[in-house]
Image (tube, grey):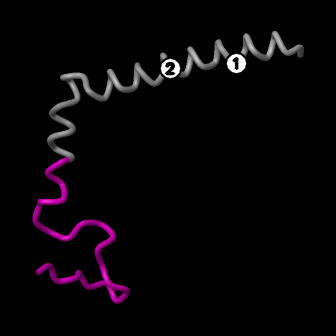
C-alpha cells in the first residue's frame, strides 16, 4: 500500500467515523428516547435494594 493509498484510506475512515459518531449523538438525543432516559434517571432514587447491594452473607445493606 503506497503512502497515497494510506492517506486516502485514512481520510475516508475519518469521515465514516465522524458520520457514525454524529448518528449516535442524534439517536441518543432524539425525542423518542426521552422517556427511557427519564426512567433510567429515576432508578437510583427508587426504594428497595438494587441488584449487587448485598453483603457476602446475603443480607441487604441498610440505607441511611
Q: Which mark is residue 18?
A: 2
Q: Residue at x 24, y 22 (%)?
A: 30
Distance, label 1 to label 2, CA atoms, is: 12 Å
Please tell me whether residue 18 belongs to the stretch shown in magenta: no
Residue 62's image quarter?
bottom left
Q: Which mark is residue 22?
A: none
Looking at marks 1 and 2 on the same chain, the residue that comes earlier in the sequence is marked by: 1
Residue 6's image quarter?
top right
Task: Name the one closer to the observer, 43 or 1.
Answer: 1
Q: How many marks?
A: 2
Q: In the image as oriented, which residue stretches furthest toward the right?
A: 1
Image location of residue 3, percent across then percent down: 85, 15
> Considering the numbered disc 1 on the image, is that residue within a helix, a strand or a loop?
helix
Q: Residue at x 23, y 81 (%)?
A: 60
Task: Name the one closer to the observer, 8 or 23.
Answer: 8
Image location of residue 25, percent across then percent down: 35, 26
Do labels 1 and 2 touch, CB within 8 Å? Answer: no
Please tell me whether residue 57 belongs to the stretch shown in magenta: yes
> Considering the numbered disc 2 on the image, is that residue within a helix, a strand or a loop?
helix
Q: Residues within 10 Å of mark 2 (few under 14, many from 20)?
A: few
Q: Which mark is residue 10?
A: 1
Residue 36's image quarter?
top left
Q: Residues within 10 Å of mark 1 (few under 14, many from 20)?
A: few
User: The N terminus appears in which quarter of the rendering?
Assistant: top right
User: The C terminus appears in which quarter of the rendering?
Assistant: bottom left
Image location of residue 21, percent across then percent down: 45, 24
Dominant secondary structure of the residues highlighted in magenta in the image = loop
Q: Which residues are magenta?
A: 41-64
Amino acid at each position: 500500500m503506497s503512502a497515497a493509498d494510506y492517506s486516502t484510506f485514512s481520510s475516508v475512515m475519518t469521515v465514516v467515523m465522524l458520520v457514525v459518531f454524529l448518528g449516535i449523538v442524534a439517536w441518543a438525543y432524539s425525542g423518542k428516547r426521552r422517556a427511557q432516559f427519564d426512567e433510567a434517571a429515576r432508578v437510583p432514587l427508587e426504594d428497595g435494594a438494587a441488584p449487587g447491594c448485598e453483603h457476602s452473607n446475603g443480607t441487604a445493606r441498610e440505607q441511611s
